[in-house]
Image (spheres, rainbow, N blue to C red):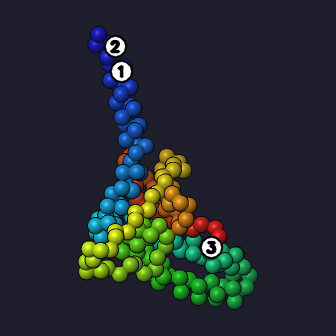
């Protein structure tokens, strides 16, 4: 009897571990949203890889502004190099404002990149209805990366990278093509 139960128990353990591994980005997203709702920037910061996220936002904004082509041209044209440096000088402070704990909270709450976080009201009036939560879809790109997109297809896509077996961090964004 014991020899027959051992494979069943082993299969159940493997299935539970596989399910926990598959569900881990969903759980991480839930924890991130709970930190956003609680307006707890410190708790949210645990789930964000700020250096990677800053670089990702900077690359996406530069691509949106058409500066990616200017990078290749800057080697042959000194004026293009000057323009690229000016664009970086303007973009860097904007990216730093957007990729702060408060900025990331605003991004997750809106499902889009926001430079200025929503001003915090002292308290909500009783007659005001609470803001509707956005629904997100989570899809695996690879073992180490998932894409989190708004269910309605708008806004930006958030990229979560695996940190350990069941832990994930927000490491990038992908702007939608217009």
In the image, farthest residue toward the right: 76
> Distance from label 1 to label 2 (Cα)?
7 Å
Circle 1 sits on which residue? Answer: 8
Rendered position, 14 above or below 96: above
Q: Is residue 71 visible?
A: no
Is disc 1 in contact with disc 2, using a CB cutoff of under 8 Å?
yes
> Distance from label 3 to label 2 (Cα)?
59 Å
- Residue at point 53% right, 60% down? 152
Whole-percent x, y for residue 42 in the image: 29, 69
- Residue at point 64% right, 88% down? 82
Q: Which numbered dot is residue 4?
A: 2
- Considering the image in quadrants, where does the N terminus appear? top left
**Does residue 171 appear left or right of residue 30 in this picture?**
right
Rendered position, 127 above or below 30: below
Whole-percent x, y for residue 93 in the image: 47, 84
**Does residue 49 appear left or right of residue 158 in this picture?**
left
**Does residue 73 appear left or right of residue 130 in this picture?**
right
- Residue at point 41% right, 51% down? 25
Q: Nearer the viewer, residue 67 or 137?
A: 137
> To which quarter of the image does residue 110 belong?
bottom left
- Residue at point 30% right, 74% down? 127
Q: Tag 1: Cα neighbours inside 10 Å, few (<14), some, or many (≥20)?
A: few
């Amino acid at each position: 009897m014991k020899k027959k139960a051992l494979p069943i128990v082993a299969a159940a353990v493997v299935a539970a571990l596989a399910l926990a591994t598959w569900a881990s980005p969903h759980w991480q997203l839930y924890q991130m949203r709970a930190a956003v709702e609680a307006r707890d920037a410190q708790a949210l910061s645990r789930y964000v890889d700020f250096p990677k996220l800053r670089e990702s936002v900077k690359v996406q904004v530069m691509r949106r502004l058409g500066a990616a082509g200017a990078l290749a041209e800057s080697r042959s044209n000194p004026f293009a190099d000057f323009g690229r440096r000016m664009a970086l000088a303007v973009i860097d402070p904007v990216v730093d404002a957007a990729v702060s704990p408060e900025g990331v909270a605003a991004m997750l709450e809106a499902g889009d990149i926001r430079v200025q976080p929503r001003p915090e009201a002292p308290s909500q009036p009783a007659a005001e209805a609470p803001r509707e939560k956005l629904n997100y879809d989570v899809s695996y790109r690879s073992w180490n990366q998932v894409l989190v997109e708004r269910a309605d297809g708008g806004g930006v896509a958030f990229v979560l990278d695996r940190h350990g077996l069941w832990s994930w961090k927000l490491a990038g964004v992908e702007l939608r093509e217009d």
